[in-house]
Amino acid sequence: MTHAVALERVYCEYGAVKAVDGVELAIAEGEFFTLLGPSGSGKTTCLRMIGGFALPTAGRVLIEGRDLTDAPPYARPVNTVFQDYALFPHMNVRENVAYGLMVRGVPRAERARRAAAMLELVRLPGVGGRRPSELSGGQRQRVALARALINEPRVLLLDEPLGALDLKLREQMQAELKALQRRLAITFIFVTHDQHEALSMSDRVGVMNRGRLEQVGTPREIYESPATRFVAEFVGAANLLEGDAARRYADGAACALLRPERIRLGSEAGARASGTVADRQYFGAFVRLRVELQSLQLAVDVPADGVVPEPGARVQLHWNAEAIRRLDGNG
Amino acid sequence: MRSSDARRAPLGLRAAAWAVVAFLHVPLALIVLYAFSAEDQSYVFPPPDLTTRWFAVAWNDRPDVWRAIRLSFEVASYATAFALVLGTLAAAALARTQFFGREAISLLLILPIALPGIITGIALRSAYSTLEIPFSFWTIVLGHATFCVVVVYNNAVARLRRTSPSLIEASMDLGADAFQTLRHVILPQLGSALLAGGLLAFALSFDEVIVTTFTAGQQTTLPIWMLAELVRPRQRPVTNVVAVVIIALTFVPILLAYYLTRADEPGAR
């Protein structure tokens, strides 16, 4: 079967800097795939190589099974939603949306009709005559989306498109993007450094660090069974058990993960560890305790509506055996 | 009440503002006045009598006036056209790229406008004679183009640096090739910067004296003609008539630029 996009041993080097260091990745048709990583991890460079804005120094980029490694951006069946939206300031919204049709020589009447349909699709009818500068951030985002979708790409690339929006709007756009992707049944490749965004929207997530793909999997696999120490720490809150602590609590593994929400407070009977509350942080839905053990600090999330121990209190910690995840690799 | 105080400037400041306007414009007013003077040997104030006959003289009896204006207009047009093409290309090459010698090139591009015109003039003259290029219309155009390129380049490079590079990427992403991107995205973005640079280049070329003196052969551009006229104590007001016509003509592009760039503003940022 052909993949929507495949990266085959792709490298991208700028001088001595390896922006992308041997990435191997296959993204299925119709998948919502997210590249997650800190800034400088190479996720945007990967996206730019798929879009044709960066050329790999080695390796191949295949789109729909065709080798398009060196093809210019205008010869690829993909379109991009840019981080800063990149709307043309000298054109109105309708002209922006219809730009892809205009440069392909589609007649004016059809352009107007399809641009209007696209603005309808992103739930932004009636703004066609306005300038981008007259729109709010969320509206610009939708115009950028409509403009990228009008060419009916097989793959849509989204480069941190929600980064500039405030939290409420971002959550709303996340839901809308997801719904849009299901409806259009095209492949979305989404780049973000926001783990919540990645976990809540994606079919699969690829976690990147220092130019390498650390792990590819479903959001659940990424969160619950991180392959490396980097993934465990980058996605969600993590207690990392190493050395003595790992030997003691994780059957002698070199390194193990214990998520704060997997630890419960309880009675002395059957407790796996006990310690003193050093500090607590209120998060609304839960309270995060910092519990001092002999040679170790653990973050423990407890419900905010229950009895929350004061700093200095002695607490008994419980967890299920499968809450401990062994970590391999040295990342 | 505080704010209404603030809106009305104190008398001293208002007087100073009018004094500056007077300082700038009284000489211009005198030029206009002398265009109507009946005395044609020297400038006397007040003019003994007022007449419009010099306009008729300039129009009917002085073909040298119109030749000079026409030559200046043509030189300025060609120099501006060269500058627009070369300045834009140079700006495109230097705005966002990094290559060996980039800093040196951008410094060397600015140099002709920083150097005294007399140096540029002498340099061009000796270059022409070394290369055995006879003086002609084109040697003037080339001479003027050296500094016209700079003003266009400066305007274009500033605008290109303020333009998001993702606009160009977005255009290519949506299916436009390099030429379509130039036409539909880059040139419209540069439009008002090129207009401003082009007008300035035209104005610089139109009244250039020093470089022209060194690079012209028998041709007389308007500024050269005016200088020559000053020495001749005959029909003095004709020079002023020409000046009045030029002042009137200058208002057209200035007003045009004002309205065009003003209309540009809301969409610009």
Image (cartoon, coloured by chain):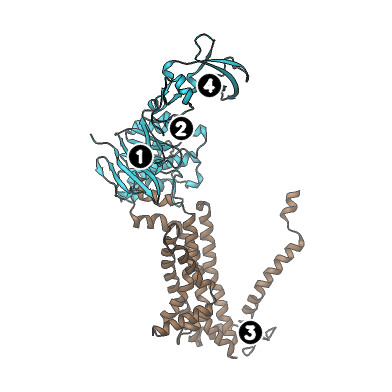
Chain colours: A cyan, B brown
Chain at tag 4: A
Distance between the alpha carbons at the discs numbered 1 and 2: 26 Å
Q: Secondary structure at mark 4?
A: strand
The secondary element bearing badge 1 is classed as strand
Give the class, few, some or many, for how many residues have Cα within 10 Å of label 1's Cα (few <14, many ≥20).
many
Q: Which residue is tagged 2?
A: A234
Label 2: state its secondary structure: helix
Amino acid type assigned to the residue bearing label 3 in the image: Ser
Split into 4 quadrants, where in the image is the N terminus of chain A?
top left
Question: What is the three-letter code of the residue carrying label 2?
Answer: Phe
Residue A158 is situated, as x and y percent measured from the top left of the image, at: 40, 40
Dot 2, crowdedness within 10 Å: few (<14), some or many (≥20)? many
Compared with A180, A95 (above or below) is: below
- Seen as rendered, the residue at the extreme left is A1
Give the structural element (helix, strand or loop) at label 3. loop
Q: Which mark is residue A300?
A: 4
Q: Camera-side residue: B4 or A256?
A: A256
Vertical position of residue B218 compared to residue B90: above or below = below
Which residue is the site of mark 3? B37
Among the two numbered marks 2 and 4 on one chain, the one whose residue lies closer to the N terminus: 2
